[in-house]
Amino acid sequence: MKKPSNRTLIVIAIIAGVAAFCTLVLPYMLCPQWYIPKANASTGYTAPVTAEGWALMIAGFVFVGIATVCLKLRKLD
């Protein structure tokens, strides 16, 4: 199997990075009811409390993994 071009790997990594940001950071900021607050609520949240929060967190980490693999494959030349 032929390795994808560097440009293709970079585009996939950028798209996966943006998707990771959208699934990890934006729900955390826009839907705080999905997360368990810390003792001092001004410092953020500890973990997701709903199924939606967990699903978005898992999807976000998958996107981070895809972006990392694409960037590592690009440097294997």
Image (cartoon, helix red, strand yellow):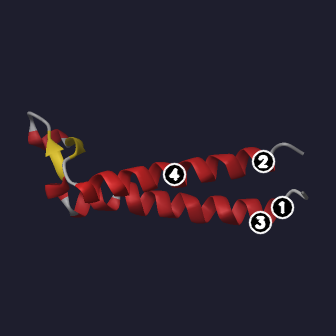
Query: Which residue is rendered at x = 31% and y = 51% of the image?
Result: 54
Q: Which residue is mark 2?
A: 73
First of labels 3, 2 by sequence position: 3
Query: Which residue is rendered at x = 91% and y = 58% of the image?
Result: 2
The amino acid marked with disc number 4 is Val
Q: Secondary structure at mark 3?
A: helix
Q: Which residue is mark 3?
A: 8
Distance Cα–Cα, label 4 vs label 2: 16 Å
The amino acid marked with disc number 2 is Leu
Quadrant of residue 6 in the image? bottom right
- Please give left or right for residue 46 compared with residue 65 in the image: left
Numbered badge on residue 4? 1
Q: Position of residue 76 (x, y in %)?
A: 84, 42
First of labels 2, 1 by sequence position: 1
Which of the two discs, 4 and 2, sits closer to the camera?
4
- Please give left or right for residue 27 compared with residue 72 in the image: left
Q: Position of residue 50 (x, y in %)?
A: 20, 54
First of labels 3, 4 by sequence position: 3
Q: Are marks 1 and 3 in contact (CB under 8 Å)?
A: yes
Q: Nearer the viewer, residue 1 or 12?
A: 1
Distance Cα–Cα, label 1 vs label 3: 6 Å
Numbered badge on residue 62? 4
Distance Cα–Cα, label 2 vs label 1: 9 Å
Q: Are marks 2 and 1 in contact (CB under 8 Å)?
A: yes
Q: Are marks 3 and 2 in contact (CB under 8 Å)?
A: no
Q: Position of residue 68 (x, y in %)?
A: 63, 46
First of labels 4, 2 by sequence position: 4
Quadrant of residue 11 in the image? bottom right
Query: Which residue is rendered at x = 62% and y = 62% of the image?
Result: 14
The amino acid marked with disc number 3 is Thr
